[in-house]
Amino acid sequence: PEVGLQTSAAPAGPLQPCPDVPPNLQGVLRVEFSTNRSLEDVRQRLGPVLQEGGRYKPPTCVAKQKVAIIIPFRNRHEHLKHWLHFLHPILIRQQLDYGVYIINQEGDSVFNRAKLMNIGHVEALKEYDYDCFVFSDVDLIPLDDRNLYRCSDNPRHLSVAVDKFNFILPYATIFGGVSAISKEQFLKVNGFSNTFWGWGGEDDDLSQRLYFQGMSISRPDSLIGRYKMIKHGRDLHNNPNPQNVHKLKETAYNMNTDGLNSLSYTVREIKKDLLYTFITVDVQAPA
Ligand code: UD2
Ligand code: MN
């Protein structure tokens, strides 16, 4: 079997904590987006190690953190296939106790990435006592598995060097793409704003919330933090919203009343696949 995917039997006696540095990492990864990738192969390969809902726990040690991976989603099934194909083996090698939550916005009203993240946080916590949340775009694949999908003392921005931005961090406070934030850190800032409709600004708003609460952003170095973004155009109903730029001046004023404590939505369906939990929600978009 592939290195790191063995269904090794648990040793007798109580399990020890997993080591700080996972032993089976590969380092730099080869990532390509061949067109005919089927999820059946992934299900076959990972069937023996994953649990329904895209859940995993290392069999031989106690994971340091319980991590919920939250992916905002609508109509990107092709990207999701690639994401699952590449990420599950990586997360397994990283020895995480994790679950994958796809939060699917119902209907074709204007998209709201940040609100989907808040919903993912709340829904994941209903299932398990997660202490770390990794918020990830569906189209971002890490190019190095030493980039650990877990939380640290400060909120951590993982997608440091994306090919689309020529592998350069576009600006110092960026927090979009893939980021890891502990439950405690997320609660402290009242989560994301729910009111950034359409493309842009929601990630900068969260970044400002973090700084206003005295946190700063940690990052891996720009070699380990490399990513590929699957090529895509702008989706329907997710145009840049010029209002979002103005809203960024009001973060300090709004953050205590706009976020987890004002979150309102309806769950339409929860589907469990071996590879993920797929939650379809009505985000109550403005008419
Ligand atoms: C950038 C940010 C992203 C977010 C966005 C502004 C990076 C690397 N990425 O990405 O985190 O802040 O700008 O909102 O900084 N999605 C769907 N269906 C849709 C629309 C969006 O599934 O119809 C999801 C999907 O997970 C996607 C994500 O939302 O990856 C962000 O949308 P995008 O990929 O169009 O935005 P992009 O690449 O400009
Ligand atoms: Mn993208």
Image (cartoon, grey):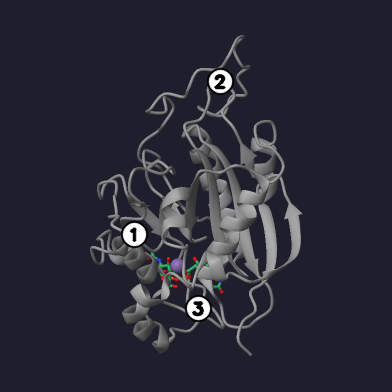
Q: Which residue is mark 3?
A: 195
Alpha carbons under labels 1 and 2: distance apart: 34 Å
> Tag 3: residue type?
Thr
**Is residue 37 shown to the viewer in this render?**
no
- Residue at 34% across, 73% down: 252
Question: Circle 1 sits in a helix, a strand or a loop, which is it?
Answer: strand
Q: Where residue 162 is drawn, which disc sits there?
A: 1
**Image position, residue 65 (x, y; %):** 49, 36
**Image position, residue 173 (x, y; %):** 27, 64
* Mark 1 C-beta to ligand 1 under 8 Å: yes
Alpha carbons under labels 3 and 1: distance apart: 27 Å
Q: Earlier in the sequence, mark 3 or mark 1?
A: 1
Quarter of the image where one finds residue 72: bottom right
* Mark 3 C-beta to ligand 1 under 8 Å: no
Q: Earlier in the sequence, mark 3 or mark 2?
A: 2
Question: Circle 2 sits in a helix, a strand or a loop, which is it?
Answer: loop
> Tag 2: residue type?
Thr
**Is residue 70 shown to the viewer in this render?**
yes
